[in-house]
Amino acid sequence: MIEWIDFTHWQDCKALERPGYVFEVVNADEQRMLTPCIVPLEVPFDWSTLPIKFRMVPEQQPRHSAPLPPSVSGG
């Protein structure tokens, strides 16, 4: 991981990209999102403040869900 970077430098995120890493973006309300480098960044609809900082973090590995229960046949 790297240190927090002021969001005014987001347009430079392509130079920071590394395989297996994504960016954690935080707004003034401490809401967080994980994203690849997308310029311009589209923030979630429920964010009421703009992003203020970002950093590179390891990408989370996918998790396997539990199998679906067997269907119940009626009739």
Image: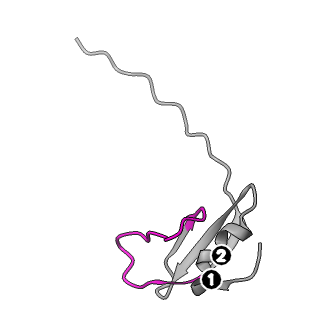
Q: On the image, which quarter does residue 53 sit in? A: bottom right
Relative to residue 7, is residue 12 depicted above or below? above
Choose between 63 and 54: the one closer to the eye: 54
Q: Which residue is mark 1?
A: 9
Choose between 75 and 18: the one closer to the eye: 18
Quadrant into which the N terminus falls: bottom right
Residue 75 place in picture, x, y as percent: 22, 11
Q: Main secondary structure of the magenta part?
A: loop
Task: Please say if the residues under marks 2 and 1 sit with CB atoms less than 8 Å apart.
Answer: yes
Residue at the farthest left position: 75
Residue 50 place in picture, x, y as percent: 44, 84
At 68% from the left and 58% from the top, the residue drawn is 59
Local secondary structure at mark 2: helix
Amino acid at the residue labelled 2: Asp
Local secondary structure at mark 1: helix
Amino acid at the residue labelled 1: His
Mark 2 packing: few (<14 Cα in 10 Å), some, or many (20+)? few
> What numbered label is drawn on residue 26?
none
Inter-mark Cα distance, 2 to 1: 6 Å
Residue 71 place in picture, x, y as percent: 38, 22
Q: Which residue is mark 2?
A: 12
Task: Write down the region rendered in magenta.
Answer: 34-53
Mark 1 packing: few (<14 Cα in 10 Å), some, or many (20+)? few
Relative to residue 69, is residue 55 depicted above or below? below
Q: Is residue 74 magenta?
A: no
